[in-house]
Amino acid sequence: MNTKRLNNNEAEEQGEHRLEKAERETHYIFNEADGYWIADSTLPRDIHKLEKQHWIETSVQYYKDGTVMAKQFKAPRNCLSPRDYNPNKPKREMSAEHKAKVMEALTKSREKKKQNKN
């Protein structure tokens, strides 16, 4: 393989083909030596969530048309905590008394809203 470049310009990080849904993924890696999380994502939903939570963007890869393909982020240790997932956890039930109280407050607020419109 020829590794010699014709110029000193670095190649831009661009994707040739769009990733399919089965190829998109998000990885969270904890760097114990430095004490921060690294997130590498190609899922737009996860990318937006990480941006909203103010994770620090470290790099971006683009498709040839200029749209974002993937982003890498980092954040302090306390920004992500693994939790137990229990799908069999019972849902909380509202007592009849509490339901009645909530419904009463809801009807009052609706009536008040109607009066304000008129």
Image: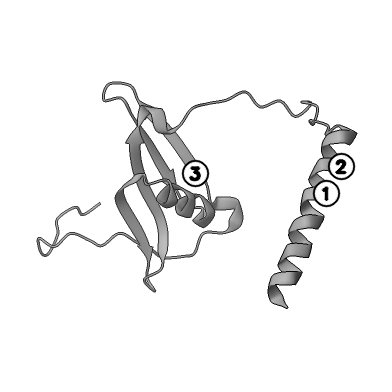
Question: Residue 26 shows which numbered tag?
Answer: 3
Percent x, y of residue 46: 50, 49
Q: Check disc 2 and give the amino acid type.
A: Ala
Q: Amino acid at mark 3?
A: Thr
Is 93 placed left or right of 62 in the picture?
right
Q: Quadrant of residue 20?
A: bottom right
- Residue 28, position as x, y percentages in the image: 45, 35
Tag 2–tag 1 contact (CB < 8 Å): yes
In the picture of the structure, the residue carrying the numbered disc 2 is 100
- Decide which of tag 2 and tag 3 comes sooner along the chain: 3
Labels 3 and 1: the sequence-earlier one: 3
**Which colour assignment does the render follow?**
one colour
**Residue density around tag 1, few if under 14, some if 14–19, many if 20 or more, within 10 Å:** few
Q: Which mark is residue 104?
A: 1
Identify which residue is drawn at 47% across, 54% down: 48
Q: Residue at x 52, y 46 (%)?
A: 25
Q: Quadrant of the C terminus?
A: bottom right
Please say whether residue 42 is visible from this viewpoint: no
Residue 22 or residue 53, whichever sits in front: 53
Separation of marks 3 and 1 at Cα, in angstroms: 45 Å
Q: Position of residue 39 (x, y in %)?
A: 41, 40
Residue 32 location (% of width, % of height) = 33, 21
* Depth order, front residue of 74/19: 74
